[in-house]
Amino acid sequence: MRARTSGRRSRTRARFTPRAKAFVLGAVVVTGAAVGYFTLFPGRAPAFVRDAFSSVGLADPPTCPLTGVAAPQGAVPERPTLAIKVENSPESRPQASLNDADIVVEEPVEGGYTRFIAIFHCGRSDRVGPVRSGRMTDPAYLRQFGDVVFGYAGGVSAVKTAVERAGLVDVNYIVAADAYTRDASRSAPHDLFTTTAALWRAADKTGDAPPPVFAYSDAWDGKARRARTVHLPYSGVSDVYWAWSQRDETWLRSHGPTPHTLEDGSQVAATNVVIQVVEVTDSRIIDAAGNASPDVELTGSGRAYVLRDGGMIAGRWERESLGDVTRFLTRDGAEITLAPGRTWVQLVPSTVSVERVTPTDT
């Protein structure tokens, strides 16, 4: 019996040789370093690491679902998405509060013009506009945001029907007249303004916070090409340039050589610009000038480009149905992540070129 016991003890001691102890100590050091790094930069941690942190009380701080930045006062607002239709004719400029929105979408409308959908959740503003009428593109695009309150300056009956069928809460200027005001210093129809608080109040609806529609990361480790300026020539009245400001670490918007400035004098800026190339055809809806309203195809797939951190990532977008969130993927199928911050989405017709000005490959 003593011999067997002695052998068992010998085998136990053999497991803790100096080499084994050094290996264990090294593993502890590496693990500790990894924990420290991911604690400082939780957005870079793999999902299983974030799950482990959550189980021991080291979960990521709450972030705004539509920007990926830290939620105000440490809590995600318990309210639905608010979308407001904003005009973009030269007569409507300068607009108010586009830099306060979480996401801004630019869409083609009649006659070569574009309009914006200013989307708010964590963001808010005491003055948004000029507010203009809706288009069929709006409810189709907005369905991916869950509960949505939609403020706009009316529209044809087909648009109003589509808004209802999409499940959006309609707070247009006729339904919620008290939520809108006319600015006497501006000429009609470029004089209608609203506030985010007034429209959320008019909706009289509590709703869930929106799902994230983009993935975020502090850095992009995949393939990208350096881009100083990107040109999106929608038309002569909507000639869009986005230029990277290294000093401000943001994308700045211009119309041709003219900076796109807002009422407060600030230039329109975005952390990310998502260029979604779409098929556009003429619908049966005709405006007062005889122009056909565009029909924008928002399901299926197409080319996409993501501008972040001074670079352009080429890939594609996919959306199986209007109830799904649009996904942005590299050519190899990896999900493209955005930098936390405000995002502009450019719905660019496939007939419009996406021009990278004075580019240099990385």
Image (cartoon, rainbow, N blue to C red):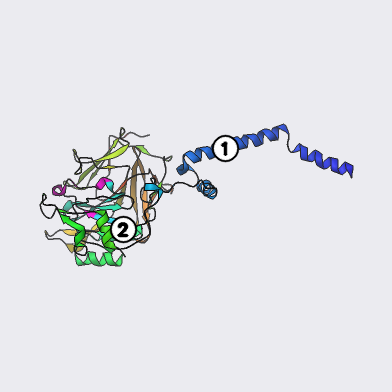
Whether residue 234 is situated above or below residue 141 in the rendered picture: above
Cα distance between the residues tagged 1 and 2: 44 Å
Residue range in magenta is: 85-99
The percent coordinates of residue 140 (x first, y second) are: 30, 60
Residue lying at 22% horizontally and 66% vertically, measured from the top left? 158
Mark 2, other Cα within 10 Å: few <14 / some 14–19 / many ≥20: many
Left or right of 36 in this view: 272: left
The one of 123 and 17 positioned closer to us in this rendering: 123
Residue lying at 28% horizontally and 67% vertically, measured from the top left? 164
Whether residue 257 is situated above or below residue 125 in the rendered picture: above
The one of 216 and 205 positioned closer to us in this rendering: 205
The label shown at residue 63 is: none
Residue lying at 45% horizontally and 43% vertically, measured from the top left? 43
Element assignment for label 1: helix
Q: Dividing the picture into quarters, in which one does residue 18 lie?
A: top right
Residue under label 1: 32
